[in-house]
Image (cartoon, rainbow, N blue to C red):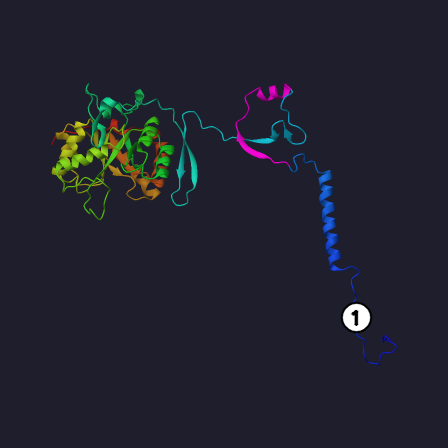
Amino acid sequence: MESDDLTAPLGQETPKKPRKLPISAPQALAGLLGLFGLVVVGWALVADNPLGGEPVAVVAAPPPVAGQAMAEAGDGKHHARHDGLNDFGPVVRAMPSKPAPPPGAKTVTIIDGSSGKHEDVVVPGGGAAAKPPVDKQLLESTPQGAIPQIGPDGARAHAHYANPRKLPANRTEAPRIAIIVGGMGISASGSADALAKLPAPVTLAVAPYGTGLGALAAQARAQGHELLLQVPMEPFDYPNNDPGPRTLLTSLASGQNVDRLHWLMSRMQGYVGLVNYMGGKFTASDQALGPVLRETAKRGLIYVDDGGSARSVAAQLAGSQNLPFAKADIVLDASPMPTEIDRALTRLEMIARTNGTAVGFANAQPAAIARIAAWAKTVEDRGFVLVPISMVAVKAKSS
Protein backbone atom coordinates (compact mmCIF):
# COMPACT_ATOMS: atom_id res chain seq x y z
CA MET A 1 0.00 0.00 0.00
CA GLU A 2 1.34 3.43 -1.04
CA SER A 3 2.26 5.78 1.77
CA ASP A 4 0.72 9.26 1.86
CA ASP A 5 0.95 12.35 4.05
CA LEU A 6 -1.39 10.85 6.70
CA THR A 7 0.64 7.68 7.22
CA ALA A 8 4.09 9.24 6.92
CA PRO A 9 6.09 9.68 10.14
CA LEU A 10 6.05 13.20 11.56
CA GLY A 11 8.94 15.41 10.48
CA GLN A 12 9.63 13.48 7.29
CA GLU A 13 8.52 14.34 3.75
CA THR A 14 7.30 11.70 1.45
CA PRO A 15 9.43 11.62 -1.75
CA LYS A 16 7.35 12.61 -4.81
CA LYS A 17 7.59 10.71 -8.05
CA PRO A 18 8.13 12.80 -11.29
CA ARG A 19 5.04 13.34 -13.33
CA LYS A 20 4.94 11.80 -16.78
CA LEU A 21 4.25 13.94 -19.91
CA PRO A 22 0.90 13.28 -21.50
CA ILE A 23 2.68 12.37 -24.83
CA SER A 24 6.02 10.75 -25.60
CA ALA A 25 8.97 12.42 -27.45
CA PRO A 26 8.40 10.43 -30.70
CA GLN A 27 4.81 11.53 -30.68
CA ALA A 28 5.84 15.21 -30.29
CA LEU A 29 8.31 14.98 -33.17
CA ALA A 30 5.71 13.36 -35.41
CA GLY A 31 3.30 16.16 -34.58
CA LEU A 32 5.83 18.89 -35.48
CA LEU A 33 6.59 17.24 -38.81
CA GLY A 34 2.92 16.98 -39.57
CA LEU A 35 2.42 20.66 -38.77
CA PHE A 36 5.33 21.64 -41.07
CA GLY A 37 3.80 19.61 -43.88
CA LEU A 38 0.48 21.37 -43.45
CA VAL A 39 2.23 24.78 -43.68
CA VAL A 40 4.00 23.79 -46.91
CA VAL A 41 0.80 22.50 -48.49
CA GLY A 42 -1.09 25.62 -47.42
CA TRP A 43 1.59 27.91 -48.90
CA ALA A 44 1.50 26.04 -52.20
CA LEU A 45 -2.29 26.50 -52.35
CA VAL A 46 -2.34 30.24 -51.70
CA ALA A 47 1.00 31.50 -53.14
CA ASP A 48 0.93 32.86 -56.73
CA ASN A 49 4.02 31.23 -58.20
CA PRO A 50 3.23 29.84 -61.67
CA LEU A 51 6.86 28.83 -62.20
CA GLY A 52 7.12 26.75 -59.04
CA GLY A 53 9.06 23.59 -59.75
CA GLU A 54 9.83 24.50 -63.38
CA PRO A 55 13.44 25.08 -64.57
CA VAL A 56 14.26 28.74 -65.33
CA ALA A 57 17.29 29.87 -67.37
CA VAL A 58 18.71 33.38 -66.97
CA VAL A 59 20.72 34.73 -69.93
CA ALA A 60 21.99 38.09 -71.14
CA ALA A 61 20.14 39.11 -74.27
CA PRO A 62 20.05 42.30 -76.32
CA PRO A 63 16.81 44.27 -76.28
CA PRO A 64 14.33 43.26 -79.02
CA VAL A 65 14.18 45.19 -82.24
CA ALA A 66 11.54 47.91 -82.13
CA GLY A 67 8.17 46.46 -83.08
CA GLN A 68 9.35 42.86 -82.90
CA ALA A 69 7.80 42.14 -79.49
CA MET A 70 4.43 43.61 -80.55
CA ALA A 71 4.46 41.65 -83.80
CA GLU A 72 5.08 38.40 -81.98
CA ALA A 73 2.33 39.21 -79.46
CA GLY A 74 -0.18 39.94 -82.21
CA ASP A 75 0.34 36.97 -84.48
CA GLY A 76 -0.98 34.43 -81.98
CA LYS A 77 2.22 32.34 -82.04
CA HIS A 78 4.68 31.34 -79.31
CA HIS A 79 2.71 33.04 -76.50
CA ALA A 80 3.93 32.40 -72.97
CA ARG A 81 1.49 30.15 -71.11
CA HIS A 82 0.31 30.65 -67.55
CA ASP A 83 2.08 27.48 -66.47
CA GLY A 84 5.45 29.15 -67.01
CA LEU A 85 6.24 27.37 -70.28
CA ASN A 86 6.12 28.47 -73.87
CA ASP A 87 5.90 26.36 -77.02
CA PHE A 88 9.64 25.64 -76.90
CA GLY A 89 10.03 24.63 -73.25
CA PRO A 90 10.89 26.53 -70.05
CA VAL A 91 10.48 30.28 -69.97
CA VAL A 92 13.75 32.15 -70.57
CA ARG A 93 14.01 35.41 -68.68
CA ALA A 94 16.17 37.95 -70.52
CA MET A 95 18.51 40.05 -68.44
CA PRO A 96 19.55 43.47 -69.82
CA SER A 97 22.92 43.33 -71.58
CA LYS A 98 25.81 45.65 -70.69
CA PRO A 99 25.64 49.00 -72.47
CA ALA A 100 27.76 49.10 -75.60
CA PRO A 101 30.89 51.27 -75.43
CA PRO A 102 30.61 54.68 -77.11
CA PRO A 103 31.53 54.93 -80.80
CA GLY A 104 35.26 54.64 -81.38
CA ALA A 105 35.91 53.32 -77.89
CA LYS A 106 37.64 50.03 -77.20
CA THR A 107 37.41 47.60 -74.29
CA VAL A 108 40.73 46.47 -72.81
CA THR A 109 40.79 43.48 -70.46
CA ILE A 110 43.26 43.94 -67.59
CA ILE A 111 44.48 40.73 -65.94
CA ASP A 112 45.95 40.98 -62.44
CA GLY A 113 49.04 38.77 -62.46
CA SER A 114 48.79 37.90 -58.77
CA SER A 115 45.08 37.18 -58.38
CA GLY A 116 44.09 36.40 -61.95
CA LYS A 117 41.17 38.84 -61.67
CA HIS A 118 39.84 40.18 -64.99
CA GLU A 119 38.64 43.75 -65.34
CA ASP A 120 37.31 45.39 -68.49
CA VAL A 121 38.33 49.01 -69.01
CA VAL A 122 36.62 51.08 -71.71
CA VAL A 123 39.19 53.21 -73.54
CA PRO A 124 37.62 56.24 -75.20
CA GLY A 125 38.38 56.71 -78.87
CA GLY A 126 38.71 60.46 -78.52
CA GLY A 127 37.36 61.05 -82.01
CA ALA A 128 40.88 61.07 -83.48
CA ALA A 129 41.14 60.97 -87.24
CA ALA A 130 42.28 57.75 -88.84
CA LYS A 131 46.04 57.41 -88.85
CA PRO A 132 47.99 56.26 -91.89
CA PRO A 133 48.67 52.54 -91.83
CA VAL A 134 52.13 51.10 -91.60
CA ASP A 135 53.73 51.79 -94.98
CA LYS A 136 55.59 48.77 -96.35
CA GLN A 137 57.73 51.08 -98.47
CA LEU A 138 59.12 52.46 -95.23
CA LEU A 139 60.19 49.00 -94.04
CA GLU A 140 63.29 46.98 -94.86
CA SER A 141 63.39 43.22 -94.39
CA THR A 142 66.41 42.12 -92.35
CA PRO A 143 67.43 38.86 -90.63
CA GLN A 144 66.09 40.36 -87.38
CA GLY A 145 62.77 41.40 -88.92
CA ALA A 146 61.24 44.43 -90.64
CA ILE A 147 62.82 47.73 -89.60
CA PRO A 148 62.28 51.35 -90.71
CA GLN A 149 63.95 52.74 -93.81
CA ILE A 150 63.71 55.92 -95.85
CA GLY A 151 61.24 55.35 -98.70
CA PRO A 152 62.13 55.42 -102.40
CA ASP A 153 60.54 58.87 -102.62
CA GLY A 154 62.46 60.15 -99.60
CA ALA A 155 59.58 59.67 -97.15
CA ARG A 156 60.66 59.26 -93.54
CA ALA A 157 58.98 57.42 -90.69
CA HIS A 158 59.19 60.40 -88.34
CA ALA A 159 57.04 62.44 -90.75
CA HIS A 160 54.75 59.64 -91.93
CA TYR A 161 53.76 58.51 -88.43
CA ALA A 162 53.71 61.97 -86.84
CA ASN A 163 50.42 63.36 -85.59
CA PRO A 164 50.97 67.11 -85.31
CA ARG A 165 48.26 69.28 -83.83
CA LYS A 166 46.63 71.97 -85.88
CA LEU A 167 46.92 74.95 -83.57
CA PRO A 168 44.47 77.85 -83.66
CA ALA A 169 45.80 81.12 -85.00
CA ASN A 170 46.03 82.64 -81.52
CA ARG A 171 48.09 79.71 -80.19
CA THR A 172 50.79 79.27 -82.84
CA GLU A 173 53.30 81.25 -80.78
CA ALA A 174 52.27 79.83 -77.40
CA PRO A 175 54.90 77.93 -75.37
CA ARG A 176 54.87 74.24 -76.33
CA ILE A 177 55.14 71.35 -73.89
CA ALA A 178 55.67 67.72 -74.88
CA ILE A 179 55.17 64.89 -72.41
CA ILE A 180 56.60 61.39 -72.97
CA VAL A 181 55.30 58.46 -70.92
CA GLY A 182 57.59 55.42 -71.14
CA GLY A 183 57.39 51.79 -70.10
CA MET A 184 54.35 51.07 -72.26
CA GLY A 185 53.92 47.36 -72.88
CA ILE A 186 55.60 46.19 -69.68
CA SER A 187 52.49 46.22 -67.50
CA ALA A 188 49.08 45.50 -69.02
CA SER A 189 47.34 47.55 -66.34
CA GLY A 190 49.78 50.45 -66.68
CA SER A 191 49.39 50.50 -70.47
CA ALA A 192 45.58 50.37 -70.25
CA ASP A 193 45.60 53.12 -67.61
CA ALA A 194 47.72 55.38 -69.82
CA LEU A 195 45.54 54.77 -72.87
CA ALA A 196 42.37 55.43 -70.89
CA LYS A 197 43.48 58.64 -69.16
CA LEU A 198 46.15 60.45 -71.19
CA PRO A 199 45.14 62.84 -73.99
CA ALA A 200 46.28 62.23 -77.56
CA PRO A 201 49.13 64.80 -77.61
CA VAL A 202 51.01 62.82 -74.94
CA THR A 203 53.72 60.74 -76.64
CA LEU A 204 53.99 57.10 -75.57
CA ALA A 205 57.34 55.26 -75.44
CA VAL A 206 57.07 51.48 -75.80
CA ALA A 207 59.51 49.05 -74.19
CA PRO A 208 60.71 46.34 -76.60
CA TYR A 209 60.12 43.38 -74.28
CA GLY A 210 56.34 43.33 -73.85
CA THR A 211 53.92 40.98 -75.60
CA GLY A 212 51.39 42.12 -78.17
CA LEU A 213 53.38 45.24 -79.01
CA GLY A 214 51.92 45.43 -82.51
CA ALA A 215 48.36 45.58 -81.18
CA LEU A 216 49.37 48.08 -78.50
CA ALA A 217 51.06 50.31 -81.08
CA ALA A 218 48.03 50.16 -83.39
CA GLN A 219 45.63 51.05 -80.58
CA ALA A 220 47.80 53.93 -79.34
CA ARG A 221 48.09 55.36 -82.84
CA ALA A 222 44.35 54.98 -83.40
CA GLN A 223 43.82 57.18 -80.35
CA GLY A 224 46.14 59.84 -81.76
CA HIS A 225 49.33 59.19 -79.78
CA GLU A 226 52.76 59.42 -81.36
CA LEU A 227 55.08 56.54 -80.48
CA LEU A 228 58.73 56.16 -79.58
CA LEU A 229 60.65 52.90 -79.22
CA GLN A 230 62.70 52.60 -76.04
CA VAL A 231 66.23 51.27 -76.69
CA PRO A 232 67.98 49.64 -73.69
CA MET A 233 71.50 51.01 -73.23
CA GLU A 234 74.26 50.24 -70.76
CA PRO A 235 74.08 52.04 -67.39
CA PHE A 236 77.14 52.72 -65.25
CA ASP A 237 76.36 49.86 -62.86
CA TYR A 238 75.85 47.20 -65.55
CA PRO A 239 75.44 44.20 -65.18
CA ASN A 240 74.15 44.67 -61.62
CA ASN A 241 71.55 46.91 -63.22
CA ASP A 242 70.62 45.16 -66.46
CA PRO A 243 68.10 46.87 -68.81
CA GLY A 244 67.30 43.58 -70.56
CA PRO A 245 68.19 41.34 -73.52
CA ARG A 246 70.03 42.90 -76.50
CA THR A 247 71.15 45.89 -74.43
CA LEU A 248 73.58 48.11 -76.34
CA LEU A 249 76.99 47.92 -74.63
CA THR A 250 80.16 50.02 -74.76
CA SER A 251 82.19 46.80 -74.81
CA LEU A 252 80.71 45.65 -78.13
CA ALA A 253 81.89 46.60 -81.60
CA SER A 254 79.71 49.14 -83.42
CA GLY A 255 78.50 46.46 -85.85
CA GLN A 256 77.31 44.28 -82.98
CA ASN A 257 75.40 47.16 -81.41
CA VAL A 258 73.79 48.04 -84.75
CA ASP A 259 72.78 44.40 -85.15
CA ARG A 260 71.15 44.50 -81.72
CA LEU A 261 69.52 47.79 -82.61
CA HIS A 262 67.95 46.20 -85.69
CA TRP A 263 66.41 43.46 -83.54
CA LEU A 264 64.98 46.07 -81.18
CA MET A 265 63.62 48.13 -84.09
CA SER A 266 61.78 45.08 -85.44
CA ARG A 267 59.70 44.60 -82.29
CA MET A 268 56.92 46.90 -83.54
CA GLN A 269 56.12 49.39 -86.29
CA GLY A 270 54.64 52.85 -86.59
CA TYR A 271 56.96 54.85 -84.31
CA VAL A 272 58.46 58.26 -85.06
CA GLY A 273 61.78 57.72 -83.29
CA LEU A 274 63.93 56.18 -80.58
CA VAL A 275 64.51 57.10 -76.95
CA ASN A 276 67.16 55.64 -74.67
CA TYR A 277 66.20 53.38 -71.77
CA MET A 278 68.80 53.82 -68.99
CA GLY A 279 72.17 54.13 -70.75
CA GLY A 280 74.12 56.51 -68.51
CA LYS A 281 77.43 54.92 -69.54
CA PHE A 282 76.52 54.28 -73.17
CA THR A 283 75.20 57.78 -73.91
CA ALA A 284 78.34 59.31 -72.39
CA SER A 285 80.57 57.57 -74.98
CA ASP A 286 81.04 59.19 -78.39
CA GLN A 287 82.46 55.97 -79.78
CA ALA A 288 79.50 53.85 -78.64
CA LEU A 289 76.63 56.27 -79.24
CA GLY A 290 77.85 57.75 -82.56
CA PRO A 291 77.11 54.69 -84.76
CA VAL A 292 73.69 54.29 -83.15
CA LEU A 293 72.72 57.87 -83.95
CA ARG A 294 74.02 57.49 -87.51
CA GLU A 295 71.79 54.44 -87.92
CA THR A 296 68.84 56.34 -86.41
CA ALA A 297 69.25 59.15 -88.97
CA LYS A 298 69.71 56.61 -91.77
CA ARG A 299 66.37 55.01 -90.87
CA GLY A 300 64.42 58.29 -91.05
CA LEU A 301 63.74 58.53 -87.30
CA ILE A 302 64.17 61.14 -84.59
CA TYR A 303 66.20 60.56 -81.43
CA VAL A 304 65.10 61.62 -77.94
CA ASP A 305 67.32 61.74 -74.87
CA ASP A 306 65.26 60.89 -71.78
CA GLY A 307 67.18 63.41 -69.67
CA GLY A 308 68.30 60.84 -67.13
CA SER A 309 72.04 61.50 -67.47
CA ALA A 310 73.80 64.87 -67.40
CA ARG A 311 76.83 63.29 -69.12
CA SER A 312 74.99 62.36 -72.32
CA VAL A 313 76.64 63.54 -75.56
CA ALA A 314 73.55 62.85 -77.68
CA ALA A 315 72.81 66.52 -78.37
CA GLN A 316 76.32 67.15 -79.75
CA LEU A 317 76.38 64.00 -81.89
CA ALA A 318 72.87 64.52 -83.27
CA GLY A 319 73.96 67.77 -84.91
CA SER A 320 76.75 66.07 -86.85
CA GLN A 321 74.26 63.48 -88.17
CA ASN A 322 71.61 66.02 -89.27
CA LEU A 323 69.30 64.11 -86.94
CA PRO A 324 66.03 65.54 -85.54
CA PHE A 325 66.58 65.58 -81.78
CA ALA A 326 64.85 66.40 -78.51
CA LYS A 327 65.90 66.07 -74.90
CA ALA A 328 63.73 65.82 -71.82
CA ASP A 329 64.23 68.82 -69.55
CA ILE A 330 62.77 67.13 -66.46
CA VAL A 331 62.16 63.55 -65.37
CA LEU A 332 58.74 64.17 -63.88
CA ASP A 333 58.57 61.13 -61.61
CA ALA A 334 62.15 61.13 -60.33
CA SER A 335 60.32 61.26 -57.00
CA PRO A 336 57.11 59.23 -57.43
CA MET A 337 55.13 61.17 -54.80
CA PRO A 338 52.11 62.95 -56.34
CA THR A 339 53.06 66.28 -54.77
CA GLU A 340 56.58 66.04 -56.24
CA ILE A 341 55.20 65.20 -59.68
CA ASP A 342 52.99 68.29 -59.46
CA ARG A 343 56.03 70.41 -58.58
CA ALA A 344 57.96 68.96 -61.52
CA LEU A 345 55.11 69.84 -63.88
CA THR A 346 55.14 73.41 -62.56
CA ARG A 347 58.89 73.64 -63.23
CA LEU A 348 58.27 72.30 -66.73
CA GLU A 349 55.87 75.17 -67.38
CA MET A 350 58.51 77.67 -66.24
CA ILE A 351 61.05 76.19 -68.67
CA ALA A 352 58.54 76.32 -71.52
CA ARG A 353 57.71 79.95 -70.77
CA THR A 354 61.42 80.83 -70.79
CA ASN A 355 62.60 78.74 -73.77
CA GLY A 356 59.45 78.45 -75.84
CA THR A 357 59.45 74.64 -75.56
CA ALA A 358 59.89 72.03 -72.83
CA VAL A 359 59.89 68.23 -72.69
CA GLY A 360 58.99 66.08 -69.68
CA PHE A 361 59.51 62.34 -69.27
CA ALA A 362 57.70 59.96 -66.91
CA ASN A 363 56.96 56.25 -66.55
CA ALA A 364 53.62 54.50 -66.93
CA GLN A 365 52.97 54.26 -63.20
CA PRO A 366 49.61 55.08 -61.55
CA ALA A 367 50.70 58.24 -59.73
CA ALA A 368 52.45 59.74 -62.75
CA ILE A 369 49.58 58.94 -65.11
CA ALA A 370 46.99 60.38 -62.71
CA ARG A 371 48.88 63.64 -62.10
CA ILE A 372 49.76 64.19 -65.78
CA ALA A 373 46.14 63.52 -66.80
CA ALA A 374 44.85 66.04 -64.25
CA TRP A 375 47.48 68.62 -65.23
CA ALA A 376 46.73 68.25 -68.95
CA LYS A 377 43.10 69.29 -68.40
CA THR A 378 44.12 72.80 -67.30
CA VAL A 379 47.56 73.48 -68.79
CA GLU A 380 46.22 75.18 -71.91
CA ASP A 381 44.08 77.50 -69.79
CA ARG A 382 47.38 78.91 -68.53
CA GLY A 383 48.58 79.83 -72.03
CA PHE A 384 50.51 76.69 -73.06
CA VAL A 385 49.85 74.09 -75.75
CA LEU A 386 50.40 70.36 -75.24
CA VAL A 387 52.00 68.86 -78.35
CA PRO A 388 53.46 65.51 -79.49
CA ILE A 389 57.22 65.05 -79.56
CA SER A 390 57.47 65.59 -83.34
CA MET A 391 56.43 69.24 -82.85
CA VAL A 392 59.41 70.05 -80.61
CA ALA A 393 62.11 67.81 -82.12
CA VAL A 394 64.43 69.89 -84.29
CA LYS A 395 67.62 69.22 -86.15
CA ALA A 396 70.36 69.96 -83.67
CA LYS A 397 73.18 72.26 -84.68
CA SER A 398 76.57 70.68 -85.20
CA SER A 399 79.05 71.58 -82.47
Task: Give the residue displayed 60% in from the left and 35% down from the top.
Answer: 56
Task: Give the residue displayed 23% in from the left and 45% down from the top.
Answer: 242
Q: Which residues are magenta?
A: 54-75
Q: Could you say whether the residue bearing mark 1 is in a helix, strand or loop?
A: loop
Left or right, 116 with respect to 298, comes to right
Q: Is 230 located above or below residue 126 in the figure?
A: below
Three-letter code for the amino acid on which mark 1 is drawn: Lys
On the image, which quarter does residue 216 sit in?
Answer: top left
The location of residue 20, given as percent across then percent down, is 78, 64
Q: Is 287 located above or below residue 30 in the figure?
A: above
Q: Does residue 316 appear in this view?
A: no
Mark 1 crowd level (few <14, some 14–19, many ≥20, 10 Å Cα): few
Q: Does residue 100 appear in this view?
A: yes
Look at mark 1 in the image and give the residue it sits on.
17
Q: Is 154 located above or below residue 307 in the figure?
A: above
| Residue 196 within the magenta-colored segment of the rendering | no
The location of residue 95, given as percent across then percent down, is 55, 32
Along the line of sight, which residue is nearer the eye, 152 or 330? 152
The location of residue 13, given as percent across then percent down, is 81, 77
On the image, which quarter does residue 102 sit in?
Answer: top left
On the image, which quarter does residue 22 sit in?
Answer: bottom right
The location of residue 77, given as percent across then percent down, is 63, 21
Along the line of sight, which residue is nearer the eye, 375 or 221? 221
Quadrant where the N terminus sits is bottom right
Task: Give the residue displayed 23% in from the left and 35% down from the top.
Answer: 264
Left or right, 15 with respect to 273, comes to right
Left or right, 12 with respect to 97, comes to right
Left or right, 167 with respect to 103, comes to left
